[in-house]
Image (tube, rainbow, N blue to C red):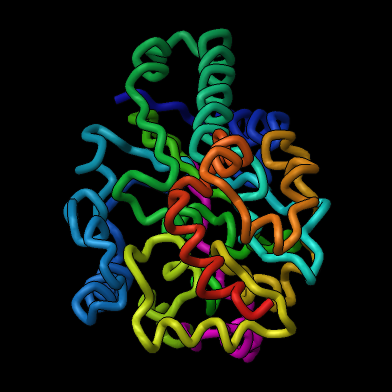
Amino acid sequence: MPTRKGQDISNKLKAEALRLGFSACGLAKAAPVDFSHYDTYSKWIKTGKHADMGYLEKYEEMRMDPRKLHPGSRTVISLALNYYPEKRLNNDQYQFALYVYGKDYHDVMKQKIRELWSSFCDQLDNTDSSIDVDRIRESCKICVDTAPILERYWAWKSGIGWIGRNKTLIIPHKGSFFFLGEILTELEFDEYDVPMEPHCGTCHKCIDACPMHALGDSIDARLCLSYLTIEHKGEFDEKQSSIDSINKKNNISIYGCDCCQLACPHNRAALPTKVEEFKPSEQFLSMRPDDWNRLTKEEYQQLFRGSAVKRAKYEGLMRNISHLGNHK
């Protein structure tokens, strides 16, 4: 069992994460998910609030125990990377969720985590001969969004932040505009971080700001504007089509939604990202409604090369523009 006594090794990992631009890094012992979280997730699935995202029903054993996802894991390392942009679309433009302003976070985050793990293992190699560093280096599993793991749960468990009423991970004094990623490793630490108590108090601003009233005790994806404009396939039904009439202040979102996050008081502390890959292009920022309405497939491919917007494909984006932007 590769083990390192004391806190020095965890401090080195966290210091290296901060040096490489991560906003937070925390450690949790790999173990089954707490029953209360397991029960909440199971009820969410059983009531159909995950809409038609069938992949969320799969790999339950792995999702509820990272040791099943990556056998031999003893530690879950959680990482957060800021994506809040310095420049944003004006209110008279069609809106996109802030997380897609730049390059695809899956690729960017994974690369940065690989860089962190390689650098950290180099430090291990130089300071601790009792650890099989080559094994540790190669045997880890890096997760960014697509693996069956409860990312926000593990970020909370590792002491990075708490899960707010809008179900985003909120980091103290920094907000919630962060990508999350994990490293599953058999390296064991004597010191692990402690989960954080929530600091939402009696605030319900995120719930009140939700255009489709999708927030409550849980998120109802069937009403969530992010789900409808990204994951939902095909045309909108009669109820879903009503979203064009409830976009507030003519701030029409055609891909994703940040209403609950922008309303959160904790995001007043959000600072612009320093990650170059997450910064929007001038071409993207200059697009006017008429430009979007006339967007060709070739222009779409050029504008969103290497972007997470491709999740909805050209046809999905144009469907959104047709339904949500037709009264602009």
Where, by quadrant of the figure, is residue 60 drawn?
A: bottom left
Report x, y in % for residue 109. Answer: 55, 36
Judged left or right of residue 215, residue 46 is: left
Q: Which residues are magenta?
A: 191-214
Residue 213 lies, with reference to residue 7, above or below; the image says below
Q: Residue at x 70, y 55 (%)?
A: 291
Question: What is the chief secondary structure element of the magenta stretch?
Answer: loop
Report x, y in % for residue 57. Answer: 20, 61
Residue 291 lies, with reference to residue 15, above or below; the image says below
Q: Residue at x 22, y 61 (%)?
A: 54
Q: Which image quadrant: the N terminus?
A: top left
Residue 5 visible: yes
Residue 104 visible: no
Count up the numbered dots. 0
User: Magenta includes 204?
Assistant: yes
Q: Residue at x 41, y 33 (%)?
A: 142
Residue 70 lies, with reference to residue 26, above or below; the image says above
